[in-house]
Amino acid sequence: MSMSDEKTLMEKFVALAGELEAALNNILHYWVSNAVDQVNGGFAGEIDNDNNPRPGAAKGLVLSSRILWAFSAAANIRKDRSLMQLAQRAYLYIRDHFIDRGYGGAYWSLTAEGDKLDGRKQTYGIAFCIYGLSEYVKLTADKEALELARKLYADLEQYAVDKNGKGYIEAFTESWGPVEDLRLSDKDANTPKTTNTHLHVVEAYAALYRVWPDAGLSGRIKDLLKIFDQEIIDKQTGHLKLFFSREWKPVISAYSLGHDIEAAWLLQHCASVLDDKTCLERFKILAVKISEAVLDGVDKDGGLFYETDVVSGTINKEKHWWVQAEAMVGFFNAYQLTNDPLYVQYLLHTWDFIKEHIIDRKYGEWFWGVTGEYNKMNEPKVGFWKCPYHNARACLELVSRIRDVLKVI
């Protein structure tokens, strides 16, 4: 790359960082202004695209945990008292309403008033609770929050680990008994093990390790990374297989492009918290391989499609907000590893797509996504799954990475 090209690239990075800072302000402001439940405590369970709250909407563990993470992470960077107060609000609500003091773990959902609705123990949800709590501990050094995160970790290790194999079982009853329906949602296959859950367990454990560098926890992170290397990442295609039997036999042929590109950078990040250079180098190699694999799913406008099936050749051309957010981080990470400016082009095209089709210029925050025909999807702005996590994290992660790159130029 010539010096003039490098200068132009750096100018683009500076401009992008400024736009992402503004986008993060927009996201955080939306949640502060619209999502706080002043009547029942915590946060609203659902708000539609026209900013209408749905009365009586359930409150999900994932929603509350991701709010806790987002405001804790933003406050960790900005040291803003108002952000810290929202993080504390999320923490106290989780502590007082979601945590199961009898059987351990955390409830899957609550009523709008904060009472237990679904007491099932979903490994994915508890992992996100650990993730949010760990970021809150990083912000506050709160000993109670750390003890709670450690207790949830111990619960997963006691009940969710497959004692006859490796990895974690998806779901259990309230008292940690077996359940027939293990699915996170109606979209998922009913299998005992999934990539999605394992990705967020290792993410949560890596976050916990940063505030509690326990030797046993380090070993569990290494075990999880090994599972991704040996069982989940397809050696031929570079994609991640999604749903598995207990014996790690894949049961469908589709690949989730969003989980691919998220895993590309996130697994590398999880490896980086360990004192293991060999492991980190391995996941840098895999990050590039996975990033290359998703490029066939990039549309001409820069948006990344939702899902592909390499056996049938079909592509789900929906473009969800979280997939675009993860694509930006994944492409920038690939650029940092390869120094290939092509990944910067993919990143910038994706950001252009987000600005044109995903960001809500009227009410704030991001829409769920668009169909293959560019029609806005009729999904909530705030909901069981729609939270300030993927998009806020992308803004925070990219601004930090851009600043690191600019420092060495």
Image: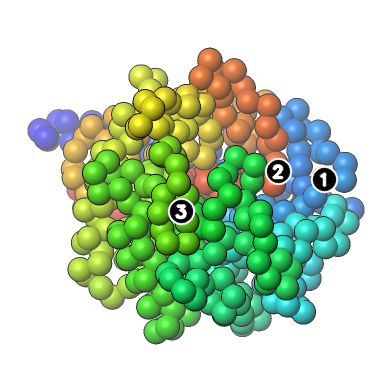
Choose mark 3 or mark 1, whichever is in front: 3
**Residue type at the position of mark 3:** Phe
Q: 102 or 382: which is nearer to us?
A: 102
Q: Earlier in the sequence, mark 2 or mark 1?
A: 1
**Local SS, label 3:** strand
- Residue 63: % across, % down: 67, 52
Q: Which mark is residue 383?
A: 2
Residue at 68%, 36% in the rendered image: 381
How far apart are the alpha carbons under marks 2 and 3? 28 Å
Choose mark 2 or mark 3, whichever is in front: 3
Image quarter of residue 174: bottom right
For residue 37, above or below residue 209? above
Inspect this view and state whether residue 163 appears.
yes
Most extreme residue toward the left is 2
- Residue 112: % across, % down: 85, 52
Q: Residues within 10 Å of mark 2 (few under 14, many from 20)?
A: many
Residue at 82%, 58% in the rendered image: 117
For residue 366, above or below residue 333? above
**Residue type at the position of mark 2:** Gly
**Local SS, label 2:** loop
Image quarter of residue 366: top right
For residue 336, above or below residue 370? below
Q: Are marks 2 and 1 in contact (CB under 8 Å)?
A: yes
Pick the quarter of the image with the N terminus: top left
Residue at 72%, 54% in the rendered image: 60
Q: Which mark is residue 244?
A: 3
Q: Residues within 10 Å of mark 1 (few under 14, many from 20)?
A: some
Inspect this view and state whether residue 41 appears.
no
